[in-house]
Amino acid sequence: MPQNLGSLGFSGSEGWFIDQRALQSSLEEQQGFALDWYRTYNVSWYDPTRYFARFDQVRASIAPGSLMPCDSSDLPMGQESTMQKYVQLFGDSDGTETVGGVVRGKCLDGVWWISPACRDNL
């Protein structure tokens, strides 16, 4: 039974955008592979990577300085209380670092916070 563990102190939303051309290609090429349904992202069944740019390609395509730095207090990763709560709830201390005695999100290039599920893929 799911249990509400409380708020991290900020509101947010989640969602995804799948390019219509990529979606159509996946449906045609892989006998109905639905990129817009999360359960089809099992790589032992399908290869969803062929429809998306790699992280290094995305990272290289964004101009330096155009993303907000993780240590900004406007972002959850820059808020010490939020990141302490994150570690407490999820046990992911590898996603944080202490700089000048302050706990914050550990971000690649200062702007990319990588989820635990993706860290081994970089």
Image (cartoon, rainbow, N blue to C red):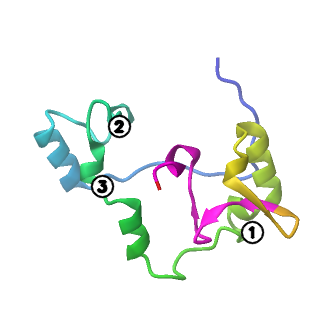
Q: CA distance from mark 2 to mark 3?
A: 12 Å
Query: Are the residues tagged 1 and 3 within 8 Å (C-beta)?
Result: no
Q: CA distance from mark 1 to mark 3?
A: 31 Å
**Residue with the mark numbered 3:** 52
Q: Secondary structure at mark 3?
A: loop
Mark 1 or 3, which is nearer the eye?
A: 3
Horizontally, residue 96 falls left or right of residue 52, namely: right
For image coordinates 84% across by 64% down, the residue present is 102
| Along the viewing direction, whichever of 73 and 43 lies nearer the viewer | 43
Q: Secondary structure at mark 1?
A: loop
For the magenta stretch, what is the residue range?
103-121
Q: Residue furthest top?
A: 1
Q: CA distance from mark 1 to mark 2?
A: 33 Å
Residue 91 appears in which quarter of the rendering? top right
**In the drawing, what numbered circle is on residue 73?**
1
Q: Is residue 68 above or below residue 90?
A: below
Horizontally, residue 86 falls left or right of residue 44, namely: right
* Residue 4 is inside the magenta segment: no
Q: Position of residue 116 (x, y in %)?
A: 58, 45
Mark 1 or 2, which is nearer the eye?
A: 2
**Quick one: quadrant of the N terminus?**
top right
Q: Is residue 71 above or below residue 77?
A: below
Q: Position of residue 42 (x, y in %)?
A: 35, 33
For image coordinates 13% across by 33% down, the residue present is 31
| Along the viewing direction, whichever of 65 and 24 lies nearer the viewer | 65
**Residue with the mark numbered 2:** 41
Hey, what amino acid is under mark 2?
Tyr
Hey, what amino acid is under mark 3?
Phe
